[in-house]
Amino acid sequence: MSAVRLPQQSQDFPAWYGQVVRRAGLAENSPVRGAMVIKPYGYAIWEAIQRALDDRIKATGHENLYFPVLVPASVLAQESTLIEGFAPEVALVTRAGGKELDEPLALRPTSEAVIWAAYGRWIESYRDLPLLYNQWANVVRWELRPRILLRTSEFLWQEGHTAHETEDEAVREVLTILHDVYADVVENVLAMPVLRGRKSASERFPGAVETYTLEALMRDGKALQAATSHFLGQGFARAFGVTYTGRDGEEQHPYATSWGASTRLVGGLVMAHGDDAGLRLPPAVAPHQVVIVPIVREDDRVQVLAAAAALADDLRAEGLRVRLDDREEHRPGFKFHEWELRGVPCRVEIGPRDLAAGSVTVARRDTGAKATVALAALAGELPALLADVQAAMFAAARAEQERRTACPDTYAEMVAWLREAGGFARAGWCGGEDCEARAKADTAATIRCLPLGQRPAASDRCVVCGEASEAVAVWAQAY
Amino acid sequence: MSAVRLPQQSQDFPAWYGQVVRRAGLAENSPVRGAMVIKPYGYAIWEAIQRALDDRIKATGHENLYFPVLVPASVLAQESTLIEGFAPEVALVTRAGGKELDEPLALRPTSEAVIWAAYGRWIESYRDLPLLYNQWANVVRWELRPRILLRTSEFLWQEGHTAHETEDEAVREVLTILHDVYADVVENVLAMPVLRGRKSASERFPGAVETYTLEALMRDGKALQAATSHFLGQGFARAFGVTYTGRDGEEQHPYATSWGASTRLVGGLVMAHGDDAGLRLPPAVAPHQVVIVPIVREDDRVQVLAAAAALADDLRAEGLRVRLDDREEHRPGFKFHEWELRGVPCRVEIGPRDLAAGSVTVARRDTGAKATVALAALAGELPALLADVQAAMFAAARAEQERRTACPDTYAEMVAWLREAGGFARAGWCGGEDCEARAKADTAATIRCLPLGQRPAASDRCVVCGEASEAVAVWAQAY
């Protein structure tokens, strides 16, 4: 950890992001282009996200399982839109066990194909449905423009794959995952407000009938797709010849869904909450919620360290995740900067004068506010303080999202707003691919989503062509 | 689940094993030779094992992280013994993103190489040591003779990789992992008694100075290596040019360890505890610790199902994992067989006569014993009953291990014992590779370990050549 300042976020966002990821110890590049090492601090955040997702995935009736990472190229190719979508990103094993393989094996870019090949063996009757399964896995997608944590040649994720008797049930599943699993975690655990919506046809997952998405806004005004949930219709069942005997005795194809969230959420946390001093972590996912920094001089060292250790024990007994930074080789100021850079939500300073006064200094990372708190009251007060930090971070991010959302009346206004990466532009859209393509060419922005149950746009005309609007669309540049 | 009987375990152990794995819903083969699908029931067992291991790995001071699955062939080759050991099993990616790669990328067979390449960047001074890291990952080793869950082309595991200032500290680490993490989980969670010992030189991990192992005995008399913990000395640090500035200001190489346990433990559970009726699961890892089977007739159906559901809620409130099997399409006898096959430790039968008498019938899977228990007392009594099942399964497995351990006086006796896959043979060994190789050629058995702190053998002579014994060795055929 060096004392060299970070680039200013507002001056050079990409450089700022790269340095925060590296210097906060989240991740670093590996010898394989585009692949990353997730370091312990970054991985601890990912484990907290995993737990939050996994708890909700199980609470909504799903079970985990595991499919192989290697998929025969012919199996991957069986659903044509899937392979067309992913072919440019596939990595192939052609040699194994000292021999050329008869058929190349793809590293899974996603697992619909290998899973639906198995579902054909598992589904016979309506009694076997629904299948509600999820896996935690690594996937490989060869990236031409990798960006650490956001777009990497290998990433970690969960992918749910379900099979249903009816279209209604499958659509309900897709929305349950979107709202009760993903939005709940992203908003209430990661403190990132999201738009919930459908994708336009051009932005759908390959093979999907409908793709639902959560779109979060980063502090440079660009959008991040936080998670997606796909209604796949009967296409995969048809492609893999999966049928079941229905209640009426007839053979029919089940309906499919798939849905995923990945380690890019860790990158999203950096960009949604970070500031010029570095990372700011919501308490719900912070590996250390509280860092205690003892302020010692030679003559009171033993006493202060003992009090700091006792305080750490008290706070841990309250169920808090506490780091006691008693390293001797660094001065308090250095430690303050380091833990600010690493985003610890709350810092407690304890020194000889504090001890004498029976109090400590508590500093919040989100606002920088400092307060003096009675030592005896701290363990009782910190949980509420951390809950307040969590809520305040969400509120601040939501206010920022609102500030950065425009409702342009004219196409010229929209182009100007989006070119400066101003944030979200909410406007009417005729539903035409030409208008979508024109706006993309003019602004580098895409339709992030057609929001669910949102208020209408300023005008009921398409902001691009002026024809009647079919839906409200939200445009933005995106990661 | 069909009513067709399993093969008898004593008649055809491999066929019995294969059918239990498949019919209990643990795993099945995938389209890629040697790779498997871990099904929800098998994966739930693996998740319980993961939690048990991960808790202990963290309690002993380690943090999790994640390294890429793809390793440049040149990095993998940097430590020569490692690549010599694994080259025949490596799978290579040669194409990605639509192009031939300049350098093939290996799918990690294990991660020492890619990790030590990074440790070189992370270690500068003794203050950076120890590094105590672990990862949960998939690995690929091309298997010529795959066996589901035991030896598969892809498997899931954890691999710990640590770096230390001194040899003493590294050796302590290796033994802490062996005893406090692995043996604690395998014996006290999986109820599998193990021998703890060192490997002979010929059985060591490629690149290890010393390999420690846990050896369990399966019910066909073959051994299963349950987990290994390696002291790697300074070889990896030298190969990857990793040095640190010591307390004396001198540059020196750190000492390395690595250690792993994998999904083969799920296969071990089947073979260590299963019987002619199928799987028997220790309560600590059973996805369902208790199954409730309502016995209904048309006229009391509602009443019995309501009582069964209320009982399930009561037991869940005690923290038990409960499955209420209220499927209408199967009769109770079918369900009894199915849950016996799937190894649920405890079955509760509840019918109209039971209800009238205010009692239920409780059947133990491990012994088959049945008892009548007052309905009101069940929630209070089941935790103790499950603890007793856990202890009884360990005791039974230990008794079986003792019964199957011979201490032959002569080489002829040892050969006869091992040829019949009798189990462990404990005898003196001169330490010579010739004697080890001769015994292997004659019996197909290998030295499983040189037990730690064990009682001496019957004789202080080598059982093969009659020269002075250097150590007590335990021979067995093995998976």
Image: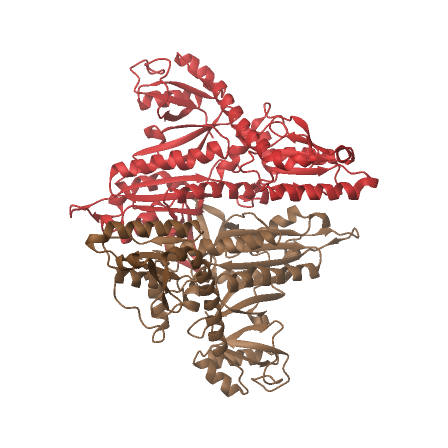
Chain colours: A brown, B red
Residue A40 seen in render:
no
* Labels in figure, total: 0
Judging depth in this view, the residue of B98 and B204 nearest the camera is: B204
Q: Residue furthest right?
A: B299
* Residue B269 coordinates in the image, percent (x, y): 53, 33
What residue lies at 37% left-to-right and 19% top-to-bottom? B455
Q: Is residue A193 left or right of residue B429?
A: right
Residue closer to the observer: B98 or A384? A384
- Vertical position of residue A56 compared to residue B174: above or below: below
Q: Position of residue A140 (x, y in %)?
A: 46, 56
Relative depth, front residue between A301 and B85: A301
Quarter in which the N terminus of chain A is drawn: bottom left
Q: Name the residue furthest left.
A: B249
Q: Quadrant of residue B259?
A: top left
Quadrant hosting residue B199: top left
Q: Quadrant of the C terminus of chain A?
A: bottom left
Residue visible at 60% across and 64% down in the picture? A208
Going by the picture, which residue comes out furthest to the front?
A357
Note whether residue A3 is visible.
yes
